Image (spheres, rainbow, N blue to C red):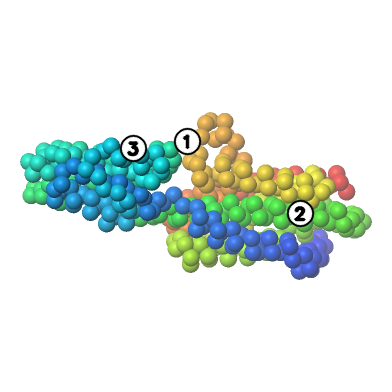
Amino acid sequence: MIRRILAMTVKELLQLRRDWRTTGTLLGMPILLLLIYGFALSFDVLDIRLAVVDMSHSRAGREVVQAFLESGYFRRVATFDETRPVDALFDSGAVQAALMIPSDFAAEVAGRRPTTLQFVLDGSDSQTASTILGYARQIVVTLTPGLYELEVSPPLSAAPLVWYNPDLESSIFLIPGLVAFILMVTSVIATTLAVVREKERGTMESLRATPLAAIELLLGKTAPYLLVASLSAAGSLALAWMLFEVPVRGSFFSLAVLTVLYLAGGLGWGVFLSTLVDSQQVAFQVALLSSMLPTLLLSGFVFPISSMVEPLQVISHIVPARYFIAALREVMLKGVGPGVWWDDALALVVYGAVVLLLATVRTVRSL
């Protein structure tokens, strides 16, 4: 059995060497997509266009404005003494936020009395508006003690401490999920197209005439793709570490085990899909839809699973990227051992076994 599987594996490796399109998809596409999406996909908001309405004309007001500008997030595009011109700027999209300082601001600060700054946002993009509001709140919290020249510390204060991602950089959160998304899509599409291409060329008929069992045929065809996809995954993770500074605090061995389990499930799903269709055009569409949409929407990559409605939370349990992303973040960002992510690894094993069983049953029927 081992000799037959090895012979099939060698045959597929030779085929991959001649088939530069499939090899290029598995090796180059993940790295290319990681570069594109890694730079384009970000929740960080920079260069925020800010209008300032300073009705106090005071040193305290200027300190507030300076604090916003020195934060690195805001860029002042207009300054007014009244609020009326601001409406037109929001209507035209010239500004994303407006800071309004009341006329009695300096007097209230000098008397150490509570006062209010008005911060107006363009809420047409709710995600961006929420991020900008968080920036503004943090600036005001940092500015307040110096502004009021407090001589006595308050009896109770909060000192926020963020673990694993101190600067709250969105790339640290997104890149592991992006790697999972790219690997799943490319591995499923490449495998599905490669097998269906053999159907169209008639080479599958020759394989049916050999003494290979269905499971031997599947393992022999999957092993080379698993090897190439693993090399591509290693390159993607290395690029995430070097270029996007995503830390790898955990064991590289753990990272390798999780990646191989995840890729095996993706390749198995691609082989299963190839048994359902007979043309490359249909195979591409089916592979793209069945891998991209669940991984993007139901894995926790972008949208938290806990915020989804109950039926979608249930469906997300059959999406392998859900478990891989969770385990990947645990290993890369937190550096924890198998005691934390073993259940995610077990789920990947179960998924891979199920899809391989389905592919085997379908292959037996076709043979």
Answer with mark 3 or mark 1, whichever residue precedes in sequence: 3
Q: Secondary structure at mark 3?
A: helix
Answer with mark 2 or mark 1, whichever residue precedes in sequence: 2
User: Which residue is denoted by mark 2 in the rendering?
Assistant: 193
Q: Considering depth in this image, is 9 or 269 the residue closer to the camera?
A: 269
**Label 3 CA crowd tier, 10 Å (few <14, some 14–19, many 20+):** few
Give the CA separation, mark 2 to mark 1: 35 Å
Q: Residue at x 59, y 58 (%)?
A: 33
Question: What kind of residue is marked 3?
Answer: Asp
Contact, mark 3 vs mark 1 (Cβ under 8 Å): no
Residue 87 tag number:
3
User: Which residue is denoted by mark 1 in the rendering?
Assistant: 307
- Which mark's residue is nearer the viewer, 3 or 2? 3
238 to 365, vertically: above or below = below
Give the CA separation, mark 3 to mark 2: 55 Å
Which quarter of the figure is the N terminus placed in? bottom right
Q: Give the quadrant of residue 362.
A: top right
Q: Position of residue 105 (x, y in %)?
A: 15, 41
Q: Position of residue 190 (x, y in %)?
A: 71, 56
- Which mark's residue is nearer the viewer, 3 or 1? 3
Q: Secondary structure at mark 1?
A: helix
Horizontal side of residue 211 vs 227, given as left or right: right
Horizontal side of residue 45 vs 286, given as left or right: left
